[in-house]
Image: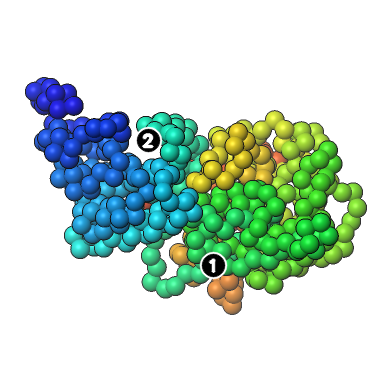
Amino acid sequence: MRTIFQWLKSRHVKSVIEIIVSDEVEPSHSDEAIEDSLKDLDVKIWNWQRTDLCSEVIVKTAPNVEEISLCSSGSNAVLVGWSSPSGLPKLKKLRKVHLLVREGLEKPGRLRGYIAAFETELRDNVRAAQEKRGQQITEIDFSSEIFSSKRSFFSVYTESRIKTLTLSPWMKCMKDFAGFLRSAKSERPINPIKIAVIDDGINMGLDIFHNRVQSGESFYRFSNISGRCGSYYVPSGPHGTLMAQLICEVCPQVKLFIAQLEELRGREGRRSFSVESAAGAIRWATLQDVDIISMSWSIDTTATYKDLDTALENAAKQGIVMLCSSIDNGPNAVDNTYPSKTGRCIKIGASTGKGTILSWVTKDRNIFLAPGEGIQPIESHMWPQGSDPIGSSVSTALAAGLAGVLLYCDRLLSTRKDEPAAKHLMPPISAQNRGIDVLRYSNNMKIAFGNLSTGPDNEQFLQVWDYFPKKLNADKWADVDMFYGEAQNWP
Protein backbone atom coordinates (compact mmCIF):
# COMPACT_ATOMS: atom_id res chain seq x y z
CA MET A 1 0.00 0.00 0.00
CA ARG A 2 2.86 2.40 0.75
CA THR A 3 4.14 1.95 -2.80
CA ILE A 4 0.90 3.26 -4.28
CA PHE A 5 0.89 6.41 -2.17
CA GLN A 6 4.60 7.01 -2.72
CA TRP A 7 3.94 6.89 -6.46
CA LEU A 8 1.15 9.48 -6.06
CA LYS A 9 3.43 11.74 -4.07
CA SER A 10 6.16 11.39 -6.70
CA ARG A 11 3.62 12.78 -9.19
CA HIS A 12 3.17 15.80 -6.91
CA VAL A 13 -0.30 14.83 -5.70
CA LYS A 14 -1.09 16.99 -2.69
CA SER A 15 -4.79 16.30 -2.07
CA VAL A 16 -6.99 13.19 -2.13
CA ILE A 17 -10.74 13.76 -2.43
CA GLU A 18 -11.69 10.29 -1.19
CA ILE A 19 -9.78 7.25 -0.02
CA ILE A 20 -11.39 3.78 0.05
CA VAL A 21 -9.26 0.90 1.31
CA SER A 22 -10.63 -2.57 2.14
CA ASP A 23 -8.39 -3.62 5.03
CA GLU A 24 -10.29 -6.41 6.83
CA VAL A 25 -8.14 -9.43 6.02
CA GLU A 26 -5.40 -10.19 8.56
CA PRO A 27 -2.73 -9.03 8.74
CA SER A 28 -4.24 -5.61 8.16
CA HIS A 29 -2.13 -2.45 7.89
CA SER A 30 -0.64 -1.12 11.11
CA ASP A 31 -1.23 2.40 12.43
CA GLU A 32 2.33 3.29 11.39
CA ALA A 33 1.83 1.99 7.84
CA ILE A 34 -1.37 4.03 7.44
CA GLU A 35 0.28 7.17 8.78
CA ASP A 36 3.32 6.78 6.51
CA SER A 37 1.13 6.13 3.47
CA LEU A 38 -1.07 9.18 3.90
CA LYS A 39 1.52 11.61 5.25
CA ASP A 40 1.38 14.97 3.41
CA LEU A 41 -1.81 14.05 1.54
CA ASP A 42 -4.84 16.23 2.27
CA VAL A 43 -7.64 13.64 2.53
CA LYS A 44 -11.22 14.98 2.43
CA ILE A 45 -13.29 11.76 2.67
CA TRP A 46 -11.96 8.89 4.80
CA ASN A 47 -13.00 5.29 4.30
CA TRP A 48 -10.13 3.08 5.43
CA GLN A 49 -11.99 -0.12 6.30
CA ARG A 50 -9.99 -1.45 9.24
CA THR A 51 -11.91 -2.61 12.28
CA ASP A 52 -11.72 -0.31 15.35
CA LEU A 53 -9.08 1.96 13.84
CA CYS A 54 -7.67 4.40 16.39
CA SER A 55 -9.14 7.87 15.89
CA GLU A 56 -5.71 9.41 16.60
CA VAL A 57 -4.47 7.91 13.32
CA ILE A 58 -7.21 9.79 11.44
CA VAL A 59 -6.59 13.02 13.35
CA LYS A 60 -2.86 12.82 12.66
CA THR A 61 -2.98 11.86 8.96
CA ALA A 62 -6.16 13.64 7.80
CA PRO A 63 -6.69 16.76 9.98
CA ASN A 64 -8.87 18.40 7.29
CA VAL A 65 -11.13 15.42 6.69
CA GLU A 66 -14.83 16.28 6.22
CA GLU A 67 -16.48 12.85 5.98
CA ILE A 68 -15.56 9.61 7.76
CA SER A 69 -16.76 6.01 7.51
CA LEU A 70 -15.92 3.98 10.60
CA CYS A 71 -15.81 0.18 10.87
CA SER A 72 -16.68 -1.11 14.33
CA SER A 73 -16.62 -4.53 15.98
CA GLY A 74 -19.25 -3.29 18.42
CA SER A 75 -16.72 -2.62 21.17
CA ASN A 76 -18.20 0.08 23.39
CA ALA A 77 -14.72 1.05 24.62
CA VAL A 78 -13.72 1.99 21.06
CA LEU A 79 -16.98 3.86 20.44
CA VAL A 80 -16.47 5.86 23.63
CA GLY A 81 -12.92 6.70 22.52
CA TRP A 82 -14.04 7.82 19.07
CA SER A 83 -16.72 10.15 20.46
CA SER A 84 -14.63 11.56 23.33
CA PRO A 85 -13.17 15.10 23.19
CA SER A 86 -9.75 13.59 22.40
CA GLY A 87 -11.19 11.59 19.49
CA LEU A 88 -13.09 12.67 16.38
CA PRO A 89 -14.23 16.07 17.79
CA LYS A 90 -10.61 17.22 17.32
CA LEU A 91 -11.25 17.28 13.55
CA LYS A 92 -12.08 20.91 12.77
CA LYS A 93 -13.82 20.32 9.43
CA LEU A 94 -15.72 17.13 10.24
CA ARG A 95 -19.27 17.27 8.88
CA LYS A 96 -20.40 13.69 8.30
CA VAL A 97 -19.90 10.33 10.07
CA HIS A 98 -21.14 6.94 8.86
CA LEU A 99 -20.78 4.07 11.35
CA LEU A 100 -20.79 0.41 10.25
CA VAL A 101 -21.14 -2.06 13.12
CA ARG A 102 -20.67 -5.81 12.66
CA GLU A 103 -22.67 -8.11 14.91
CA GLY A 104 -20.54 -10.09 17.33
CA LEU A 105 -20.60 -10.74 21.06
CA GLU A 106 -23.32 -8.25 21.86
CA LYS A 107 -26.98 -8.61 20.89
CA PRO A 108 -28.44 -6.13 18.33
CA GLY A 109 -30.50 -4.38 21.02
CA ARG A 110 -27.41 -3.65 23.10
CA LEU A 111 -25.50 -2.54 20.00
CA ARG A 112 -28.26 -0.07 19.16
CA GLY A 113 -27.92 1.34 22.68
CA TYR A 114 -24.17 1.74 22.18
CA ILE A 115 -24.74 3.49 18.84
CA ALA A 116 -27.33 5.87 20.29
CA ALA A 117 -24.95 6.82 23.12
CA PHE A 118 -22.11 7.24 20.61
CA GLU A 119 -24.17 9.59 18.44
CA THR A 120 -25.24 11.71 21.42
CA GLU A 121 -21.70 12.01 22.79
CA LEU A 122 -20.25 12.74 19.35
CA ARG A 123 -22.75 15.52 18.65
CA ASP A 124 -22.29 17.08 22.10
CA ASN A 125 -18.49 16.93 22.01
CA VAL A 126 -18.23 18.22 18.43
CA ARG A 127 -20.49 21.14 19.33
CA ALA A 128 -18.41 21.87 22.44
CA ALA A 129 -15.17 21.71 20.41
CA GLN A 130 -16.59 24.09 17.79
CA GLU A 131 -17.62 26.56 20.48
CA LYS A 132 -14.20 26.34 22.14
CA ARG A 133 -12.47 27.01 18.81
CA GLY A 134 -14.82 29.91 18.05
CA GLN A 135 -16.19 28.11 14.99
CA GLN A 136 -19.65 28.44 13.54
CA ILE A 137 -21.81 25.68 15.02
CA THR A 138 -22.54 23.01 12.38
CA GLU A 139 -24.50 19.86 13.21
CA ILE A 140 -22.89 16.51 12.37
CA ASP A 141 -24.68 14.41 9.74
CA PHE A 142 -24.68 10.95 11.36
CA SER A 143 -25.84 7.57 10.05
CA SER A 144 -25.24 4.00 11.18
CA GLU A 145 -25.89 0.42 10.18
CA ILE A 146 -25.66 -2.93 11.98
CA PHE A 147 -24.95 -5.89 9.75
CA SER A 148 -24.37 -9.64 9.91
CA SER A 149 -20.94 -11.02 10.80
CA LYS A 150 -21.12 -13.04 7.57
CA ARG A 151 -20.81 -9.90 5.46
CA SER A 152 -17.80 -7.69 4.79
CA PHE A 153 -17.53 -4.00 5.55
CA PHE A 154 -16.90 -3.34 1.87
CA SER A 155 -20.10 -5.03 0.67
CA VAL A 156 -22.19 -3.20 3.27
CA TYR A 157 -20.56 0.13 2.44
CA THR A 158 -21.14 -0.38 -1.28
CA GLU A 159 -24.81 -1.18 -0.75
CA SER A 160 -25.20 1.85 1.50
CA ARG A 161 -23.48 4.06 -1.07
CA ILE A 162 -25.89 2.92 -3.79
CA LYS A 163 -28.87 3.78 -1.56
CA THR A 164 -27.40 7.22 -0.87
CA LEU A 165 -26.79 7.93 -4.54
CA THR A 166 -30.37 6.95 -5.41
CA LEU A 167 -31.97 8.97 -2.60
CA SER A 168 -34.89 10.91 -4.03
CA PRO A 169 -34.46 14.70 -4.22
CA TRP A 170 -37.54 15.04 -1.98
CA MET A 171 -36.05 12.99 0.85
CA LYS A 172 -32.60 14.56 0.46
CA CYS A 173 -34.12 18.03 0.71
CA MET A 174 -36.15 17.20 3.80
CA LYS A 175 -33.34 15.30 5.54
CA ASP A 176 -30.95 18.20 4.96
CA PHE A 177 -33.50 20.63 6.43
CA ALA A 178 -34.15 18.26 9.34
CA GLY A 179 -30.43 18.41 10.16
CA PHE A 180 -30.69 22.19 10.33
CA LEU A 181 -33.76 22.08 12.59
CA ARG A 182 -31.94 19.78 15.02
CA SER A 183 -29.34 22.49 15.62
CA ALA A 184 -31.65 25.52 15.37
CA LYS A 185 -31.82 27.63 18.49
CA SER A 186 -34.40 30.12 19.70
CA GLU A 187 -34.43 32.82 22.33
CA ARG A 188 -37.54 31.25 23.86
CA PRO A 189 -38.63 27.63 24.41
CA ILE A 190 -40.38 26.09 21.40
CA ASN A 191 -42.89 23.33 21.91
CA PRO A 192 -42.21 20.25 19.76
CA ILE A 193 -44.87 19.22 17.27
CA LYS A 194 -47.32 16.66 18.63
CA ILE A 195 -48.21 14.11 15.95
CA ALA A 196 -50.61 11.23 16.52
CA VAL A 197 -49.80 8.13 14.46
CA ILE A 198 -52.97 6.06 14.24
CA ASP A 199 -52.03 2.64 12.87
CA ASP A 200 -51.10 -0.86 14.07
CA GLY A 201 -48.71 0.22 16.87
CA ILE A 202 -44.94 0.68 16.82
CA ASN A 203 -41.77 -1.15 17.81
CA MET A 204 -40.38 0.97 20.64
CA GLY A 205 -36.93 -0.61 20.33
CA LEU A 206 -35.84 1.57 17.39
CA ASP A 207 -33.26 4.23 18.15
CA ILE A 208 -35.14 6.86 16.17
CA PHE A 209 -37.99 6.76 18.72
CA HIS A 210 -35.70 7.50 21.69
CA ASN A 211 -37.25 10.38 23.71
CA ARG A 212 -39.85 10.95 20.98
CA VAL A 213 -42.81 8.82 22.12
CA GLN A 214 -44.90 10.96 24.46
CA SER A 215 -47.87 8.67 25.01
CA GLY A 216 -49.76 5.75 23.54
CA GLU A 217 -53.01 3.82 23.74
CA SER A 218 -54.34 0.62 22.21
CA PHE A 219 -57.88 0.31 20.87
CA TYR A 220 -57.40 -3.36 20.06
CA ARG A 221 -60.27 -5.06 21.92
CA PHE A 222 -59.86 -8.12 24.12
CA SER A 223 -59.20 -11.23 22.03
CA ASN A 224 -60.57 -14.65 23.00
CA ILE A 225 -57.77 -16.19 20.95
CA SER A 226 -54.78 -14.42 22.48
CA GLY A 227 -56.44 -13.83 25.86
CA ARG A 228 -55.25 -10.23 26.06
CA CYS A 229 -55.92 -6.70 24.88
CA GLY A 230 -53.58 -4.94 22.51
CA SER A 231 -50.59 -2.79 23.48
CA TYR A 232 -49.46 0.12 21.33
CA TYR A 233 -45.83 -0.96 21.81
CA VAL A 234 -46.57 -4.52 20.61
CA PRO A 235 -47.46 -3.86 16.96
CA SER A 236 -49.64 -6.24 15.00
CA GLY A 237 -47.45 -5.56 11.94
CA PRO A 238 -44.54 -3.38 10.78
CA HIS A 239 -46.65 -0.72 9.06
CA GLY A 240 -47.15 1.74 11.92
CA THR A 241 -43.48 1.49 12.88
CA LEU A 242 -42.43 2.51 9.37
CA MET A 243 -44.91 5.41 9.24
CA ALA A 244 -43.65 6.76 12.56
CA GLN A 245 -40.02 6.37 11.38
CA LEU A 246 -40.64 8.43 8.26
CA ILE A 247 -42.36 11.18 10.24
CA CYS A 248 -39.37 11.40 12.60
CA GLU A 249 -36.90 11.50 9.71
CA VAL A 250 -38.68 14.47 8.12
CA CYS A 251 -39.66 16.30 11.32
CA PRO A 252 -37.05 15.76 14.07
CA GLN A 253 -38.67 18.12 16.59
CA VAL A 254 -41.63 15.85 17.24
CA LYS A 255 -43.43 14.09 20.06
CA LEU A 256 -45.34 11.01 18.98
CA PHE A 257 -48.73 9.90 20.27
CA ILE A 258 -49.29 6.29 19.21
CA ALA A 259 -52.80 4.85 18.84
CA GLN A 260 -53.10 1.16 17.94
CA LEU A 261 -56.16 0.14 15.94
CA GLU A 262 -57.99 -3.17 15.85
CA GLU A 263 -56.85 -4.88 12.67
CA LEU A 264 -59.30 -6.67 10.40
CA ARG A 265 -59.11 -8.37 7.02
CA GLY A 266 -60.75 -6.18 4.41
CA ARG A 267 -61.81 -6.93 0.86
CA GLU A 268 -59.56 -9.28 -1.11
CA GLY A 269 -57.60 -9.97 2.08
CA ARG A 270 -56.33 -6.39 2.37
CA ARG A 271 -55.52 -4.89 5.73
CA SER A 272 -58.24 -2.78 7.34
CA PHE A 273 -59.26 -1.57 10.79
CA SER A 274 -62.47 -1.57 12.77
CA VAL A 275 -64.60 1.57 12.71
CA GLU A 276 -64.98 1.49 16.50
CA SER A 277 -61.23 1.50 17.12
CA ALA A 278 -60.70 4.30 14.56
CA ALA A 279 -63.32 6.50 16.24
CA GLY A 280 -61.85 5.78 19.67
CA ALA A 281 -58.30 6.56 18.51
CA ILE A 282 -59.31 9.89 16.96
CA ARG A 283 -61.20 10.88 20.13
CA TRP A 284 -58.14 9.97 22.22
CA ALA A 285 -55.78 11.97 19.98
CA THR A 286 -58.13 14.96 20.21
CA LEU A 287 -58.10 14.75 24.02
CA GLN A 288 -54.28 14.73 23.89
CA ASP A 289 -54.48 18.06 22.01
CA VAL A 290 -52.15 16.86 19.25
CA ASP A 291 -51.26 19.19 16.38
CA ILE A 292 -51.45 16.62 13.59
CA ILE A 293 -53.10 13.23 13.08
CA SER A 294 -51.52 10.92 10.51
CA MET A 295 -53.76 8.14 9.17
CA SER A 296 -52.02 5.99 6.52
CA TRP A 297 -55.00 3.68 5.98
CA SER A 298 -58.59 3.56 4.79
CA ILE A 299 -61.80 1.76 5.74
CA ASP A 300 -63.77 0.73 2.66
CA THR A 301 -67.48 1.00 3.37
CA THR A 302 -70.61 2.48 1.82
CA ALA A 303 -72.17 2.88 5.26
CA THR A 304 -72.14 6.00 7.41
CA TYR A 305 -70.82 5.77 10.97
CA LYS A 306 -71.98 8.56 13.26
CA ASP A 307 -69.32 7.97 15.95
CA LEU A 308 -66.49 8.16 13.43
CA ASP A 309 -68.00 11.20 11.71
CA THR A 310 -68.36 12.96 15.07
CA ALA A 311 -64.80 12.11 16.11
CA LEU A 312 -63.41 13.56 12.87
CA GLU A 313 -65.65 16.62 13.14
CA ASN A 314 -64.54 17.36 16.72
CA ALA A 315 -60.87 16.98 15.81
CA ALA A 316 -61.33 19.43 12.94
CA LYS A 317 -63.13 21.92 15.21
CA GLN A 318 -60.21 21.74 17.64
CA GLY A 319 -57.88 22.83 14.84
CA ILE A 320 -56.06 19.53 14.39
CA VAL A 321 -54.50 18.96 10.96
CA MET A 322 -55.57 15.52 9.74
CA LEU A 323 -53.95 13.67 6.85
CA CYS A 324 -55.16 10.46 5.26
CA SER A 325 -54.19 8.24 2.32
CA SER A 326 -55.61 7.84 -1.13
CA ILE A 327 -56.68 4.32 -2.02
CA ASP A 328 -54.39 2.58 -4.52
CA ASN A 329 -57.09 0.87 -6.60
CA GLY A 330 -56.34 2.41 -10.00
CA PRO A 331 -56.80 5.96 -11.35
CA ASN A 332 -60.50 5.69 -12.20
CA ALA A 333 -61.76 4.00 -9.02
CA VAL A 334 -64.25 5.79 -6.78
CA ASP A 335 -62.90 6.48 -3.31
CA ASN A 336 -65.75 5.82 -0.88
CA THR A 337 -63.58 5.16 2.15
CA TYR A 338 -63.19 6.60 5.61
CA PRO A 339 -61.71 8.97 6.56
CA SER A 340 -61.24 10.67 3.16
CA LYS A 341 -64.93 10.75 2.15
CA THR A 342 -65.77 13.06 5.06
CA GLY A 343 -63.71 15.83 3.48
CA ARG A 344 -62.14 16.73 6.82
CA CYS A 345 -58.66 15.42 6.03
CA ILE A 346 -55.89 16.45 3.65
CA LYS A 347 -55.77 13.52 1.26
CA ILE A 348 -52.34 12.37 0.05
CA GLY A 349 -51.53 10.20 -2.97
CA ALA A 350 -48.29 8.52 -4.01
CA SER A 351 -45.93 9.77 -6.71
CA THR A 352 -42.44 9.09 -7.98
CA GLY A 353 -39.60 10.98 -6.33
CA LYS A 354 -39.96 13.73 -8.92
CA GLY A 355 -43.73 14.14 -8.79
CA THR A 356 -45.35 11.84 -11.37
CA ILE A 357 -48.46 10.20 -9.92
CA LEU A 358 -48.08 6.43 -9.62
CA SER A 359 -50.26 4.48 -12.02
CA TRP A 360 -52.33 2.66 -9.37
CA VAL A 361 -53.23 5.74 -7.30
CA THR A 362 -56.91 6.66 -7.32
CA LYS A 363 -57.38 10.28 -8.38
CA ASP A 364 -60.84 10.71 -6.86
CA ARG A 365 -60.74 13.44 -4.17
CA ASN A 366 -56.94 13.67 -4.36
CA ILE A 367 -55.38 16.95 -3.35
CA PHE A 368 -51.62 16.49 -2.91
CA LEU A 369 -48.89 14.07 -3.95
CA ALA A 370 -45.70 13.06 -2.13
CA PRO A 371 -43.12 10.36 -2.94
CA GLY A 372 -44.46 6.84 -2.44
CA GLU A 373 -41.62 4.75 -3.84
CA GLY A 374 -37.85 4.49 -3.48
CA ILE A 375 -38.02 5.44 0.21
CA GLN A 376 -35.40 3.87 2.47
CA PRO A 377 -36.03 4.46 6.19
CA ILE A 378 -32.98 4.73 8.45
CA GLU A 379 -33.67 1.44 10.24
CA SER A 380 -34.80 -0.44 7.13
CA HIS A 381 -34.12 -3.84 8.74
CA MET A 382 -37.51 -3.50 10.45
CA TRP A 383 -39.32 -3.69 7.11
CA PRO A 384 -40.04 -7.22 5.74
CA GLN A 385 -37.12 -8.50 3.65
CA GLY A 386 -37.70 -8.27 -0.09
CA SER A 387 -40.61 -5.84 0.34
CA ASP A 388 -39.90 -2.15 -0.23
CA PRO A 389 -42.22 0.39 1.44
CA ILE A 390 -44.42 1.77 -1.34
CA GLY A 391 -47.76 3.46 -1.91
CA SER A 392 -49.93 6.32 -0.64
CA SER A 393 -49.53 5.31 3.02
CA VAL A 394 -45.81 6.13 2.76
CA SER A 395 -46.66 9.45 1.09
CA THR A 396 -49.09 10.31 3.88
CA ALA A 397 -46.43 9.82 6.57
CA LEU A 398 -44.00 12.04 4.65
CA ALA A 399 -46.66 14.73 4.21
CA ALA A 400 -47.44 14.56 7.94
CA GLY A 401 -43.76 15.13 8.64
CA LEU A 402 -43.74 18.09 6.24
CA ALA A 403 -46.79 19.58 7.97
CA GLY A 404 -44.92 19.24 11.25
CA VAL A 405 -41.89 21.04 9.80
CA LEU A 406 -44.03 23.95 8.58
CA LEU A 407 -45.76 24.25 11.94
CA TYR A 408 -42.44 24.13 13.80
CA CYS A 409 -40.99 26.85 11.53
CA ASP A 410 -44.09 28.92 12.26
CA ARG A 411 -43.43 28.65 15.99
CA LEU A 412 -39.71 29.21 15.59
CA LEU A 413 -39.97 32.36 13.52
CA SER A 414 -43.15 33.87 15.04
CA THR A 415 -43.59 35.97 11.90
CA ARG A 416 -47.28 36.70 12.50
CA LYS A 417 -46.59 39.37 15.08
CA ASP A 418 -46.13 42.11 12.47
CA GLU A 419 -48.60 40.81 9.88
CA PRO A 420 -51.92 42.47 9.09
CA ALA A 421 -55.13 40.62 9.87
CA ALA A 422 -55.91 37.79 7.42
CA LYS A 423 -59.70 37.49 7.30
CA HIS A 424 -59.79 34.54 4.87
CA LEU A 425 -58.06 32.13 7.25
CA MET A 426 -59.88 29.79 9.63
CA PRO A 427 -59.91 31.17 12.20
CA PRO A 428 -59.01 34.67 10.89
CA ILE A 429 -55.79 36.14 12.30
CA SER A 430 -56.48 39.30 14.23
CA ALA A 431 -54.81 41.39 16.89
CA GLN A 432 -56.62 39.29 19.49
CA ASN A 433 -55.54 35.82 18.36
CA ARG A 434 -52.12 36.20 16.78
CA GLY A 435 -50.72 33.85 19.41
CA ILE A 436 -52.47 30.82 17.93
CA ASP A 437 -50.86 28.24 15.66
CA VAL A 438 -52.56 29.37 12.49
CA LEU A 439 -51.34 26.32 10.57
CA ARG A 440 -53.07 24.07 13.10
CA TYR A 441 -56.11 24.08 10.86
CA SER A 442 -56.44 21.78 7.86
CA ASN A 443 -57.72 24.57 5.59
CA ASN A 444 -54.70 26.74 6.33
CA MET A 445 -52.28 23.83 5.95
CA LYS A 446 -53.87 23.12 2.55
CA ILE A 447 -53.07 26.69 1.52
CA ALA A 448 -49.47 26.28 2.68
CA PHE A 449 -49.18 22.94 0.86
CA GLY A 450 -50.66 24.52 -2.27
CA ASN A 451 -48.03 27.27 -2.19
CA LEU A 452 -45.30 24.61 -2.20
CA SER A 453 -46.87 22.52 -4.97
CA THR A 454 -46.86 22.17 -8.74
CA GLY A 455 -49.35 20.43 -11.03
CA PRO A 456 -53.14 20.31 -11.56
CA ASP A 457 -55.67 20.46 -8.73
CA ASN A 458 -55.98 16.70 -8.14
CA GLU A 459 -52.27 16.00 -8.68
CA GLN A 460 -50.46 18.79 -6.81
CA PHE A 461 -46.95 17.56 -6.04
CA LEU A 462 -45.26 18.93 -2.91
CA GLN A 463 -42.08 20.03 -4.69
CA VAL A 464 -40.20 21.04 -1.58
CA TRP A 465 -36.74 21.48 -3.12
CA ASP A 466 -37.91 24.62 -4.94
CA TYR A 467 -38.58 26.34 -1.62
CA PHE A 468 -36.48 24.88 1.18
CA PRO A 469 -33.04 26.55 1.44
CA LYS A 470 -30.25 24.46 -0.11
CA LYS A 471 -27.58 25.36 2.47
CA LEU A 472 -28.23 26.44 6.02
CA ASN A 473 -26.33 27.29 9.16
CA ALA A 474 -27.84 27.43 12.62
CA ASP A 475 -27.43 31.20 12.88
CA LYS A 476 -28.70 32.15 9.39
CA TRP A 477 -32.43 32.70 9.56
CA ALA A 478 -32.95 34.98 6.55
CA ASP A 479 -33.28 32.09 4.11
CA VAL A 480 -35.69 30.24 6.39
CA ASP A 481 -37.77 33.37 6.86
CA MET A 482 -37.94 33.82 3.08
CA PHE A 483 -38.89 30.15 2.57
CA TYR A 484 -41.60 30.32 5.21
CA GLY A 485 -42.91 33.49 3.60
CA GLU A 486 -43.43 31.50 0.41
CA ALA A 487 -45.31 28.76 2.27
CA GLN A 488 -47.62 31.17 4.08
CA ASN A 489 -48.27 33.37 1.02
CA TRP A 490 -51.97 33.57 1.81
CA PRO A 491 -54.10 34.55 -1.18
The residue singled out by tag 2 in the image is 153
Q: Residue at x 62, y 56 (%)?
A: 202
The residue singled out by tag 1 in the image is 420
Q: Residue at x 30, y 41 (%)?
A: 51
From the viewer's perspective, tell me whether residue 243 is left or right of residue 377. Answer: right
Residue 101: percent from left, percent from top: 39, 44
Q: Residue at x 64, y 48 (%)?
A: 238
Q: 5 or 451, which lies in front? A: 5
From the viewer's perspective, tell me whether residue 334 is left or right of residue 440. Answer: right
**Label 2 is placed on what type of residue?**
Phe
Q: Residue furthest right?
A: 303
From the viewer's perspective, tell me whether residue 386 is left or right of residue 182. Answer: right
The quadrant in which residue 44 appears is top left
State the SS at label 1.
Answer: loop
State the SS at label 2.
Answer: helix
Q: 233 or 9, which lies in front? A: 233
Q: Residue furthest front?
A: 105
Residue 412: percent from left, percent from top: 46, 65
Q: Residue at x 65, y 58 (%)?
A: 234
Q: Nearer the viewer, mark 1 or mark 2?
A: 2
Above or below: residue 188 compared with residue 471: below
**Label 1 is placed on what type of residue?**
Pro
Lower position in the chain sequence, tag 1 or tag 2: 2
Q: Is residue 222 visible?
A: yes
Q: Is residue 112 visible?
A: no
Disc 1 to disc 2: CB gap under 8 Å: no
Q: Residue furthest bottom?
A: 432
Residue 220: percent from left, percent from top: 76, 61
Task: Tell me the distance, in whole angstroms, between the alpha carbons under discs 1 and 2.
Answer: 58 Å
Residue 402: percent from left, percent from top: 55, 52
From the viewer's perspective, tell me whether residue 121 is left or right of residue 258. Answer: left
